[in-house]
Image (cartoon, rainbow, N blue to C red):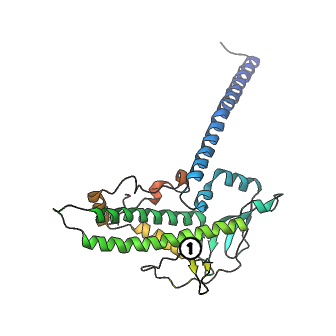
Amino acid sequence: MTLSPAQSMSTLSGSSAQSALSSTLSSIISIPYKIYSSTRVLYQEYQQWYDTNQPLFIFDTELSFEWARIRAKGELRTDNPCIEYYYFAGDPDPDHNDYHFMRFTLEDGTTLERKEYCKAWAVTKQAVIFFEGLQESLKAWENPAEPKYGDQMLRVGVILKKWEAYLDELTFSMRTLKGWEREHRVPEKWAAIPPYDYDNPHILPFAIINSAGERKILDLTPLFIPLSKHVIKLHEEGFDEEWFDLWDRLKPDPEKFAPYHLPLERPYPYKDIALRRKKVTGENQER
């Protein structure tokens, strides 16, 4: 049977109405789920913030509330030679809104993104946990059938000391920069980077005692920029297979020395910050 033009139009209109109704119902049904999902994420973030054991600078990097306020009122400033950042000029109470640093730049044009900085801290923390586990297990090793691993003990100590120094410097700089965000402090010129031996770094304390016997907070230099680049390069090169074999043999406490994860896997999932074996053939393998 052939439909008349009027019947065909009526059928199409009915089909369109059904489709629109179905789409509307789907949207309505999805609203509670979206509210639940958003609430769940905010709750997880609150839990992480409350229990956090890493610099707040990392936690704030991809915090949902942080990006909500940036999208709503943030303005990106790119005119400073040292730091590119979001600020909140139109806010009625801007003093209660921290800056949000995005990119750091040296005089020679070298740049470091905030996410890259977080990755540098995370892979450094990962290495420290790993070699702390090896060191503790080597000290506790008591098997008369096997040697005491004297040579490995010495080398693990040297490696751990180096990565602890890296972690101290990156943690110090992150905490200082978080304070700058709160204080709305942006330098017009970086302080000079002190001499620094990447193969034999000294551990910088968070405060020093000056000649008058007073505590003096160390000044921040942009050492964290080249240092971040350095540790990420070491991470990508990977560690010798020997250390992973030793870990499997000694079996350090899996809870005490559990691998580090960024809060809610942001801004990088675990696979991007997991320790890697040095490349022999093929790609580096994750721990």
- Which residue is depicted at the point 68% across and 32% down? 27
In the foreground, 95 or 108: 95
Residue 2 placement (x, y as % from top left): 67, 15
Q: Is residue 139 left or right of residue 107?
A: left
Q: Can see residue 241?
A: no
- Which residue is depicted at the point 54% across and 53% down? 263
Q: Is residue 7 left or right of residue 246?
A: right
Residue 47 placement (x, y as % from top left): 58, 48
Quadrant (top left, top right, bottom left, bottom right) of the N terminus: top right
- Furthest toward the top, the residue is 1
In the rendered view, tell whether residue 216 sits above or below residue 264: below
In the foreground, 270 or 143: 143
| Amino acid type of the residue that numbered disc 1 sits on in the rendered structure | Phe
- Furthest toward the front, the residue is 213
In the foreground, 127 or 277: 127
- Which residue is depicted at the point 60% across and 41% down? 40
Q: Can see residue 58?
A: yes
The residue wearing badge 1 is: 206
